[in-house]
Amino acid sequence: MSAALRRGSAFQELLTLAPFRRLLAVRVCWTLGIQMLLMAIAWHAYEIEGDAWALALIGLCQFIPVLLFALPAGYIVDRYPRSRVIAASLVLHALTALVLVLMAATQTLTTPALYAASVVLGVARALFLPALQSILPGLVPASMLSRAMASVSTASQLSVMLGPALAGFLIVQDVHWAYGVAAGLFVLALALPVGRHLQSQAAAPRKISLETLFAGCVYIRRHPVVLGAISLDMFAVLFGGAVALLPLYVKDILGGSPADLGLLRAAPACGAVLAAVALFMQPIRRRVGRKLLLAVGLFGLAAVVFGLSRSFWLSALALAVSGSADMVSVVIRQTLVQLETPDAMRGRVSAVNSVFVGASNQLGEFQVGAAAALLGPVTAVVAGGLITALLPLLWWKFFPALAQRDAMESNDAGQPQGGRMQALRTEAPQ
């Protein structure tokens, strides 16, 4: 059998698993909904205020709940059935979107209300992402986990590509349509239960303590390769998050419309999809540490090109390259985390990972928005890109184990207890 046929057969085998199909559908619905909702909120806030500080505060309002609620959320994900945690999070998303629909339709929506909605969405996302990430290893055989993650990433990035474009089209009509469609997508996701057939994972202790809350932090600290990978990604997104200024760039620098904003927001996802498909067809097997560092360096250089560009298509190309580079980082990091974490700890480790990586998106939005208000948008984006491009040199020095990591799976006999083999042993039965 040819290599291409074997890859196609692997994908078909994944799709025969009904729980995995439902997870894909839920991830697509949620990603479409949240992308549309966040874009509509950012555009609406900038339209009301006309100030980069509004974009900065939107990002900060989404970041603070993730930072404060991440550890309790990780405990909740490990303590209670993950399917119920996913459902509760989707309810919060849907209710928030419905409130925005009503306020926008009655022309009572204000900037403080948009800030409050961002806070609620931050709490909901703090629950949703660790729960969905933690439930995946129980839905597919361990031998298919790497390709399953690539498939989920591909579906997610396709949604990221389509969501902003659809939101831009709806905003042209009226912003409350974007809020309404997002609410409908969250309700649809609620109708697709994920993981209810799984036996309960080895639950976290019933009593909450500092030890149980911070167990994920301790686990990551004892794995320097994982710590180096997720912290590198965090700082890359923190300084290289040019996407946060897209409403300003499109309106004031490129002279575009909401539809142009949607296309540019879709460009990183387009590049990420191409990279995800390539990684599914040819998974990363060797020199993963060096490839991770190179990907982050390329991500920073792409931000520099975007910051200096005055051409719509060059800006789109730079964003597509940044999306491809980011996808390489995401696949390496998530594979390392999932393979080396036992099931009973996955929620708390994923929650810490969300603080390092997911929340850095919101903090990065605040950072680049504040820098743009103080220094100007071009200086802010170019300086952030240059800092990001230099990060791999620092990580080569401070995390040599990461830079020299060859394969995804560690062959170190002395790895901490609870590593890859324990993770495989504690997966839910199929």
Image: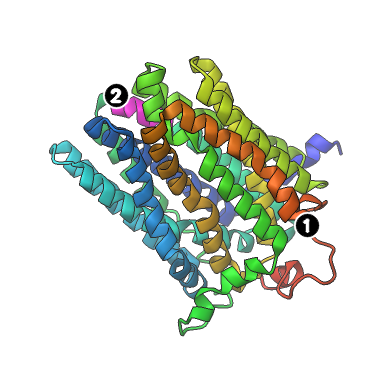
Q: Residue at x 17, y 43 (%)?
A: 103
* Magenta region includes residue 169: yes
The image quarter containing residue 44 is top left
* Magenta region includes residue 372: no
Horizontal side of 270 relative to 124 (left or right) equals right
Q: Residue at x 68, y 38 (%)?
A: 295
Is 369 situated above or below 122? above
Query: Local crowd at mark 1 within 10 Å, few (<14), some, or many (≥20)?
Result: some
Which quadrant: the N terminus? Answer: top right
- Main secondary structure type of the part rendered in magenta: helix
**The residue under label 2 is which amino acid type?**
Val
- Whether residue 147 appears in this view of the structure is no
Is 141 situated above or below 330? below
Measured as percent of width and height from the top left, residue 427 is found at 66, 69
Identify the mark nearer the N-term, 2 or 1. Answer: 2
Which label number is shown at residue 336? none
Distance from the alpha carbon under mark 2 to that under mark 1: 50 Å
Q: Give the residues drawn in magenta, as a range.
A: 164-172
**The residue under label 1 is which amino acid type?**
Ala
Residue designated by label 1: 401
Q: Residue at x 21, y 47 (%)?
A: 112
